[in-house]
Image (tube, grey):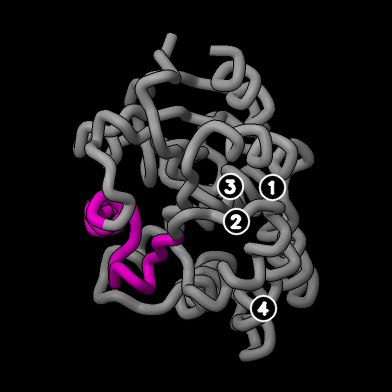
Amino acid sequence: MIDFSRFEILTFDCYGTLINWEAGILSVLHKILAGHGKTADDATLLAFYGDFEAQAELGPFRPYREVLQFVVRQLGTQLGFTPTAVEAISLPESLPSWRPWPDTVSALRQLKTRYRMAILSNVDDDLFAATRPQLGIEFDEVITAQQAQAYKPSMKLFEMALSRIHAPAHRVLHVGQSIYHDVIPAQALGLATVWVNRPSARSGSGAVRVAQAKPDLTVQSLAELASLAMHK
């Protein structure tokens, strides 16, 4: 078990960990497919999303709005249709409506009474700004892909975070839903990690690339994390 008393700041992935992004992603993608007479099950769509998002993020930096449009266009290529311009932008335009998991706000508020809190998110500043009011607390720092001009699992976001939060790596606990985006790079920089294994139609990976690593702690929800951290 992690010794929670050693940490002074918790850093969080946002989409997937705090926000139920799969519900948002799937509702839009199913609507697009229906418009072209296509169907795919949730697990298949999430696998496509994880692969196409990673493809877009590995090349020269582009804003997350463009990454999401790339995902839609690649889905069309994969399934044999051409999305309209409106359909391509419908995924990024939907992001502000993606909602927190039911336990997110209460868990964040509990944790905020004991720790400093920061966001490390693969997103554009303006998109996170639309999400921020839904999270119920003020974060001490927000580090985005736009600011770092790179996407996790690049070390650049984590390095920027460490330079701005003014805490040594051993005093930082990183919390994320993605082994690929969060656990592996955070561990490479010496951060302790919590994997929040949220429920998903694609168990164990969700809407991200499959990867293997051993986090310091695995929980099924943010409520479970808050319970463990606050009782230490």
> Residue 105's image quarter?
top right
Residue 47 vs 98, above or below: the answer is above
> What amino acid is at disc 4?
Glu
Using residue 211 as the reference point, say whether residue 86 is left or right of it: right
Q: Which stretch is magenta?
A: 142-163
| Camera-nearest residue between 74 and 198 | 198
| Camera-nearest residue between 165 and 43 | 165
Q: On the image, numbered disc 2 is attached to which residue?
A: 138
Residue 53 vs 187, above or below: the answer is below
Picture residue at 47% right of the left edge, 79% below the top: 66
As helix, strand or loop, the secondary structure at mark 1 comes to helix
* In the image, farthest residue toward the bottom: 85
Q: Is residue 52 visible?
A: no
Give the numbered dot on residue 93. Answer: 4
Q: Is residue 172 magenta?
A: no
Mark 1 or mark 3, which has the lower sequence index?
3
Q: On the image, numbered disc 1 is attached to which residue?
A: 42
Picture residue at 78% right of the left edge, 69% below the top: 31
As helix, strand or loop, the secondary structure at mark 4 comes to helix
